């Protein structure tokens, strides 16, 4: 049964869906690197920022916007694709029940997004360093890639679970998911004191090397980063707590609500 569930999750993770493919992550990284190369060879633009700072800004954009948005949409798709494909009744047959198939799909999606996020970070780092001519010191700061990849993996797992939770709200799922990432999560990062831990942007930036280094500097994320980030232990503890709470809510909802073509997963 476990092998069958993992196969379902693997197929689901790579299935083409409206929410977008996880391959968008390395593809967008290549686009950003191409922009840096184009600017570097431009005769009119002369960037002054060091290569590592350029990488940190692009990496922080992945951490705070691109990965959250793509993962929360993909999380909605975990359930929505079964409703739209009219395969939900087959997925929820015994002995698996309702929870385990969706958990398997979420788990495999974590692995896929975690690996591709790491590849995207490597592409960003190596591409930008080479574009700015920093070849001799390419390995000197390579540790930031590990920290940023780990932060993206943690963040993607939370946002995938959030998307799955939003999928319980029917046709409004995609709207709720986008609103959360763009507005709610951003505004929560601006809350004072301990309340800022409610924002996954703060958590993922705190776990990453790029977010912690850019804290307090004026950059594209300065509206968030003027707030103090949390410690590594606090970020990890909050991420574990959020994940546990999200899956507890998902478990209760799956056991208590009826899910069908008129209810869950944004069916059109």
Image: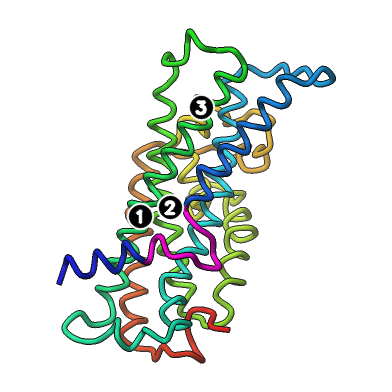
- Magenta span includes 132: no
Residue most toward the right?
A: 44
Q: Earlier in the sequence, mark 2 or mark 3?
A: 3
Please say if the residues under marks 3 and 1 sit with CB atoms less than 8 Å apart: no
Distance (Cα) linking label 1 and label 2: 7 Å
Residue name at image x 34 percent, y 39 percent: 233
Q: Which mark is residue 110?
A: 1
Nearer mark to the viewer, of 2 and 3:
3
In the shown orientation, is residue 225 left or right of residue 103?
A: right
Q: Residue at x 54, y 79 (%)?
A: 266
Quadrant the N terminus occupies: bottom left
Q: Front-most of 185 and 163? A: 163
Q: Which residue is mark 3?
A: 125
What residue span does the magenta drawing correspond to? 12-22
Residue marked by disc 2: 156
In depth, the one of 107 and 216 nearer the eye is: 107
Q: Residues within 10 Å of mark 1 (few under 14, many from 20)?
A: many
Q: Quadrant of the rendered structure where residue 221 is?
A: top right
Which residue is at 48% across, 35% downward?
A: 121
Q: Position of residue 180 (x, y in %)?
A: 58, 63
Q: In the image, 165: left or right of 42?
A: left
Q: Are marks 1 and 2 in contact (CB under 8 Å)?
A: yes
Q: Secondary structure at mark 2?
A: helix
Helix, strand or loop at label 3? It is: helix
Q: In whole angstroms, how far apart are the C-alphas of marks 2 and 3?
A: 20 Å
The mark that comes first in sequence, 1 or 2, is: 1
Q: Residues within 10 Å of mark 2 (few under 14, many from 20)?
A: many
């Amino acid at each position: 049964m476990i092998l069958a569930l993992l196969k379902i999750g693997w197929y689901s993770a790579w299935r083409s869906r409206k929410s977008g493919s996880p391959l968008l992550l390395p593809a967008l990284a290549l686009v950003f690197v191409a922009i840096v190369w184009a600017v570097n060879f431009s005769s009119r633009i002369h960037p002054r920022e060091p290569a590592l700072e350029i990488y940190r800004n692009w990496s922080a954009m992945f951490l705070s916007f691109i990965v959250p948005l793509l993962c929360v949409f993909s999380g909605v798709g975990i359930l929505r694709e079964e409703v739209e494909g009219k395969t939900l009744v087959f997925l929820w047959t015994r002995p698996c029940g309702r929870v385990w198939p969706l958990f398997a799909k979420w788990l495999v999606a974590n692995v896929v997004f975690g690996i591709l996020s790491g590849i995207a970070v490597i592409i960003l780092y190596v591409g930008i360093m080479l574009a700015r001519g920093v070849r001799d010191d390419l390995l000197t700061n390579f540790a930031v890639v590990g920290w940023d990849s780990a932060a993206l993996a943690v963040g993607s797992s939370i946002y995938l679970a959030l998307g799955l939770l939003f999928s319980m709200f029917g046709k409004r799922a995609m709207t709720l998911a986008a609103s959360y990432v763009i507005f709610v999560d951003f505004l929560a990062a601006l809350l004072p004191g301990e309340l800022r831990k409610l924002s996954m942007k703060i958590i993922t930036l705190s776990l990453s090397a790029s977010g912690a280094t850019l804290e307090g500097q004026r950059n594209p994320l300065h509206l968030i980063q003027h707030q103090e980030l949390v410690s590594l232990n606090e970020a990890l503890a909050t991420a574990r707590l959020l994940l546990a709470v999200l899956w507890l809510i998902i478990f209760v909802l799956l056991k208590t609500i009826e899910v069908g073509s008129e209810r869950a997963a944004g069916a059109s």
